[in-house]
Image (cartoon, helix red, strand yellow):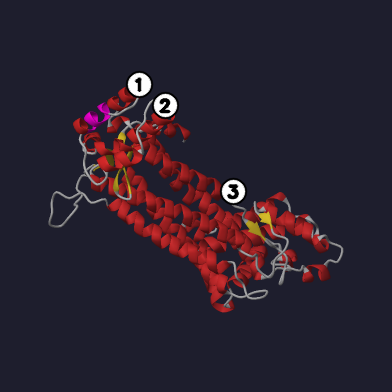
Amino acid sequence: MGEHLSEAGLNRARVHVEVEWLIAQTDRGFFGASALTDDQKAALRAVVTDFGQADIDELAELEATTRHDVKAVEYYVRRRLSSLGLDAIAELTHFACTSEDINNLSYAVTVRDAVADAWLPKFDAVIDALADLARAHRDDAMLSRTHGQPATPSTMGKELAVFVHRLRRIRSQVIDTEYLGKFSGATGTFAAHLVAAPDASWPDISREFVESLGLTWNPLTTQIESHDWQAELYARISHANRVLHNLATDIWTYISLGYFRQIPQAGATGSSTMPHKINPIRFENAEANLELSSAVLDSLAATLVTSRLQRDLTDSSAQRNIGLGLGHSMLALDNIRRGLGEIDLDRDALAADLDANWEILGEAIQTVVRAEVVAGRSSISDPYAMLKELTRGRRVGAAELAEFVSGLDIGDDAKQRLLALTPGGYTGLAGDLVDFI
């Protein structure tokens, strides 16, 4: 992440944009400039690929004088042109550009690459780990807990598959993000461009240049690119954070219920005074980092879509925190992935919980009775109320429930289905639903 979204990463991207703009202009023979040779282009592009600590220090020194980050980059590039014997094209450096022409493209490139190279692989690793667990536990029946109370059973696999499905949808939205760029001068009008070269098709040149960087051209802007794509991206990642937060709290709760055992890690300590403890710290750490990430990303999404009239600098300060927002999300992703690898399903605990809650079959019984009434095989009045009286707020054991079912006025086939039913067998199509992932 730091490779892309640090000050050094941003400056390298700025140099990249300035160099590519120089090459694009000479390729078109602007103002009689000769096209650069392949060796000259390679030497210029090596300025970007070889960008290192000495260059970072040089830019810092230049900026200390200019008090302007992009102007420092311009002077840095001019120095490189001189060292390469290319002084003749020095005035094409930063030609007709406002600082935001360079900055918006640099941010788009660095954010795109940070998401693709750093954030997305960690996000995918969590989804893959969840999908593996969902498939492994597709048929492991568990008591559901709607409102925290015993409810119709599911399987652990199906519950984890829900998160896989949710996260994959958001992933597709992140992948579909348009990384927009503008390159149209001081107020987005190509005014200086047109005066310098009245016959040039500047919108076409701008589009081709922006698209050459792998970005989507934005034709209508003020001095700045409007940052709507950034707001959309950060909202999507913040949404992913919140789904992951939901996952972390659910896994934490399953651990608390005893559904998952935590696998002891050699040398680890859970409590300074209670030797037996293994705390679910991976998921707790993830929660905190996800909350911090969303706080930053939500703020960015809200701030960046507003710029007073044609320009103000609130976005410049805000965008310095993009790496912070994504970085906290990545820390959370690391913890969740590691946490998922340190838990083991306790099938005995799941079975015991199910066996202690036979009253959850009240839903199945009243539903079957209603079907029997419609089919003319029962004359029971208000089956729901009958089961509510039997089960609401009390435990009903297997024997009591079997006796109740045996006395029902329903058809023999329906009665036998209900008598054969157990909490662990009342999972519907939960296991099959896992296959949808």
Residues 415 and 12: in front is 415
- Disc 3: CA contacts within 10 A as few (<14), some (14-19) or many (>=20): few
x%, y% of residue 437?
46, 36
Amino acid of disc 3: Asp
Number of numbered callouts drawn: 3
Q: Earlier in the sequence, mark 2 or mark 3?
A: 3
The tag earlier along the polypeptide, 2 or 1, is: 2
- Left/right placement of residue 213 relative to residue 145 reads right
Expressed as whole percent of the image width and height from the top left, the position of residue 186 reads: 71, 72
Q: Of 35 and 283, which appears nearest the observer?
A: 283
Mark sitting earlier along the chain (3/1): 3
Amino acid type, residue under disc 2 in the picture: Gly
Q: Which residue is mark 2?
A: 376
Q: Which residue is mark 3?
A: 176
Decide whether residue 404 is among the magenta residues. Answer: yes
Amino acid marked by disc 1: Asp
Q: Nearer the viewer, residue 263 or 371?
A: 371
Give above or below for 65 relative to 82: below
Q: Secondary structure at mark 3?
A: loop
Identify residue for label 1: 413
Magenta span: 401-407
How far across and how far down the image is residue 187, in percent? 72, 71
Q: Is residue 163 left or right of residue 61?
A: left
Q: Residues within 10 Å of mark 1 (few under 14, many from 20)?
A: few
Instruction: Tell me the number on the disc at residue 305.
Output: none
